[in-house]
Amino acid sequence: MAKEPLQQKPGQQDVPLTTGVILLAAGFSRRFGSIKLNALLPNGKPLVQQTLERIQAATDNVIVVTREELLASLLQAGAPTEHTLLCPDADQGMGHTLACGMAQVPAHWDAVLVCLADMPFVETRTYTALLNALRPDAIVVPEHQGKRGNPVGFGRKWFAQLAQANGDSGGREVMKGNPNAIVKVAVEDPAVHLDVDVPGDLGQHHV
C-alpha cells in the first residue's frame, strides 16, 4: 500500500464522508475455461479493463485484490500499482479475498463499496449513486426492478467483521445478520444482476 492517503475524486470534495472501492479480482475462472479477466467484450475491451474504467470514473479510491497469476493483467488494464495487492489465500474463496482487501483499507475511510471484477457492464452512474449513499452505519445495495444486485457497500461499523470473512461468504453473513441496516438504492441498471461466468455471458448486455 502507498504511504500517501487515497484522495477524493475531484468534484466530490463536498461529500462529508471518505469512501472507496475494494475490487475483488482474484477468481480462478473455473467455469469460464480460461482467464476470464482477459476475455474480450463485444466492444473489444478486456473484461477487467472495462470494469476498472467504470469504477475509476466514479472514484480514485480503489483497492484491487488479486493473485500473482493475474497481477500483470490487472496492472496492464489500469489497476493502481500502489493499491493493488496479492491475496495468498485467494484459493480458499471470495471471503478470504475480501478479508485481504479489508486489512488494507485506510483508517480514514468511512465506508467501502465491494465490487466484483467480473461485472463489466455495471454503469459508472450506478457506482456513483452507491458511493454517494454510503454511510458508516449502513449496508447499501442496488435494486433493479425489485431485485437486489451487486456491488454492495458497507459502513465502517462492519469493517472488523468483514476483515474476518472466509470461504465464499464474503459479506453475505453481515447482510443476513443486519437486515435493518440495509439501504436499498433504486437504479436503472440491469447490469447489477449480470456477472460473467462462462464465455456466452460476454455478450449478454449492451456495453
Image (cartoon, rainbow, N blue to C red):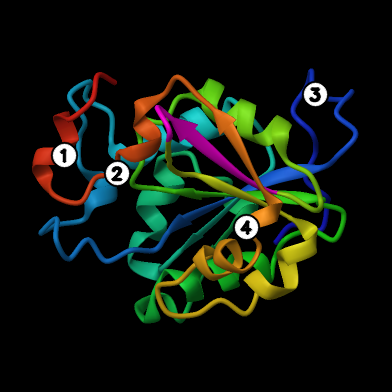
To which residue does mark 1 refer? 201
Q: Are marks 1 and 4 in contact (CB under 8 Å)?
A: no
Closest to the camera, between mark 3 and mark 2, is: 2
Q: Amino acid at mark 2?
A: Asp
Label located before the other in sequence (1 or 4):
4
To which residue does mark 2 refer? 195
Residue at position x 9%, y 40% in the image: 200
Q: Amino acid at mark 4?
A: Pro
Q: Are marks 1 and 2 in contact (CB under 8 Å)?
A: yes
Q: Main secondary structure of the magenta part?
A: strand
Measured as percent of width and height from the top left, residue 46 is found at 28, 36
**Mark 4 surroundings within 10 Å by alpha-carbon count, few (fewer than 14), some (14 through 19), many (20 or more):** few
Q: Amino acid at mark 3?
A: Gln
The quarter of the image holding the C terminus is: top left
Span shown in magenta = 139-146
Disc number placed over residue 179 in the picture, else none: 4
| Magenta-span inclusion, residue 96 | no
Residue 60 occupies quadrant: top right
User: Is 106 positioned to the left or the right of 69 in the image?
Assistant: right
To which residue does mark 3 refer? 12
Residue at position x 29%, y 48% in the image: 37
